[in-house]
């Protein structure tokens, strides 16, 4: 079985994420790329460029459409692809509004077509390493988890859909959604949320700083992101009644040196402080699961339901910013 794929954009996500992962899955073939400016030689061999999205929708050979466009285009383009009988992989967040997210999920169910959301960070080494040690109870009962998605971007880019004060713009939507999705996968729904968000690089623009705190019955989860972090600290710091886990940023080690995490715990009454290997990233699992789900061989691991749950908390945190803690129920 070969599934022909079309990419709806050839920007950074198309070149660096989707195209390599599609090429690595032998049951997929990248057949078409939407490029209004025409080909420039950077496209993978065998993929032809089309001038508009309608050409993808009208092509009966295209089975799966990857909608990797700006957030406000997620709903109309994914909806059009489903209406044309295509399966869809949709970049995160699933949509900008909750109504659109629910409508898109319902449309996919009614059409009998797959709708997968690219929450690929659940396949990163830091998430998988944290999950390994939580499952092993190395920390005991979790007390606090601090999770970062920082970067250094002091200059505002030309991407208005990410930088201007528009619905669905800013780092909370763009980066925070990954952290929220991972938190929900590990712990389920929190009880309350409190939040501080700001635009530090330019007044009255999109969020580029967030400090969002979710309360669970026995622990807290702190999600933080800033565009003024030139020296990266740990990505994850987790503390429990039994021990602590510190997971570094992937760029924290010199080239060629294997990154490790620091685990400080107790084993059989003895304090253990050791470097532990990171779990290997499994990014290729995303499209392998998509193909298996289309073939009916496995349930879809990245469906719309968890994406809608994450989007709900994204909006809850925005509402809570500058206000007392808001219930997540």
Image: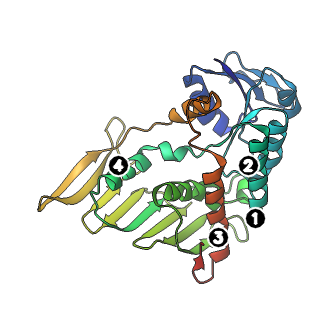
> Which sits earlier in the primary sequence, circle 4 or circle 1?
4
Res. 171 in view: no
Nearer the viewer's eye, disc 2 or disc 3? 2
- Distance between the Cα atoms at labels 2 and 1? 27 Å
Query: Badge 1 is on which residue?
Result: 165
Judge left or right: residue 149 versus residue 63: left
Instruction: Label 4, secondary structure: give it.
Output: helix
Question: Which element type, helix, strand or loop, lies under badge 1?
Answer: loop
| Residue 132, numbered label | 4
How would you rate the neighbour count of disc 3 (Cα within 10 Å): few for under 14, some for 14-19, many for 20 or more? some
Does residue 79 lie above or below 170 as drawn? Answer: above
Res. 305 in view: yes
Name the secondary structure under disc 2.
helix
Query: How far apart are the alpha carbons under marks 4 and 2?
Result: 31 Å
Q: CA distance from mark 1 to mark 3?
A: 18 Å
| Front residue of 229 and 239 | 239
- Mark 2 vs mark 1: which is more N-terminal? 2
Front-lying residue, 274 or 310: 310
For the residues bearing labels 3 and 4, Cβ distance under 8 angstroms = no
Kindly identify which residue carries mark 2. Answer: 105
Return the residue nearer the eye: 160 or 276. 276
Foreground mark, 2 or 1, reads 2
Mark 2 or mark 3: whose residue is earlier in sequence? 2
Q: Determine which of the numbered discs, if any, sits on residue 316 in the image.
A: 3
Give me the C-alpha separation between circle 4 and circle 1: 38 Å
Instruction: Classify 195 as above or below 298.
Output: below
Question: At which x and y percent is residue 163?
Answer: 71, 58
């Amino acid at each position: 079985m070969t599934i022909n794929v079309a990419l709806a954009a050839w920007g950074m996500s198309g070149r660096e994420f989707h195209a390599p992962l599609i090429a690595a899955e032998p049951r997929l073939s990248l057949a078409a790329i939407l490029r209004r400016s025409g080909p420039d030689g950077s496209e993978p061999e065998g993929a032809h460029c089309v001038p508009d999205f309608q050409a993808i929708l009208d092509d009966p050979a295209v089975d799966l459409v990857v909608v990797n466009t700006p957030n406000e285009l997620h709903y109309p383009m994914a909806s059009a692809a489903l209406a044309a009988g295509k399966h869809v992989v949709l970049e995160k967040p699933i949509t900008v509004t909750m109504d659109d997210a629910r409508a898109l999920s319902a449309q996919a169910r009614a059409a009998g077509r797959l709708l997968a959301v690219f929450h690929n960070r659940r396949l990163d080494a830091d998430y998988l390493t944290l999950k390994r040690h939580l499952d092993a109870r190395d920390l005991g009962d979790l007390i606090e988890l601090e999770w970062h998605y920082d970067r250094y971007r002091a200059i505002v880019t030309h991407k208005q859909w990410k930088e201007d004060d528009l619905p669905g713009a800013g780092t909370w939507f763009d980066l925070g959604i990954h952290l929220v999705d991972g938190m929900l996968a590990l712990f389920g729904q929190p009880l309350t949320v409190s939040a501080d968000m700001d635009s530090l690089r330019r007044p009255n623009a999109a969020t580029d700083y967030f400090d969002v705190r979710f309360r669970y019955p026995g622990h807290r989860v702190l999600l933080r992101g800033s565009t003024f972090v030139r020296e990266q600290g740990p990505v994850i710091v987790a503390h429990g009644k039994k021990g602590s886990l510190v997971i570094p940023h992937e760029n924290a080690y010199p080239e060629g040196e294997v990154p490790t995490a620091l685990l400080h715990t107790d084993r059989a009454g003895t304090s253990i402080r050791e470097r532990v290997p990171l779990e290997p990233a499994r990014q290729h699992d995303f499209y392998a699961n998509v193909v298996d789900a289309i073939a009916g061989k496995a349930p879809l691991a990245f469906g719309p339901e968890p994406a809608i749950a994450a989007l709900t908390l994204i909006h809850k945190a925005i509402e809570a910013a500058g206000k007392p803690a808001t219930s997540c129920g």
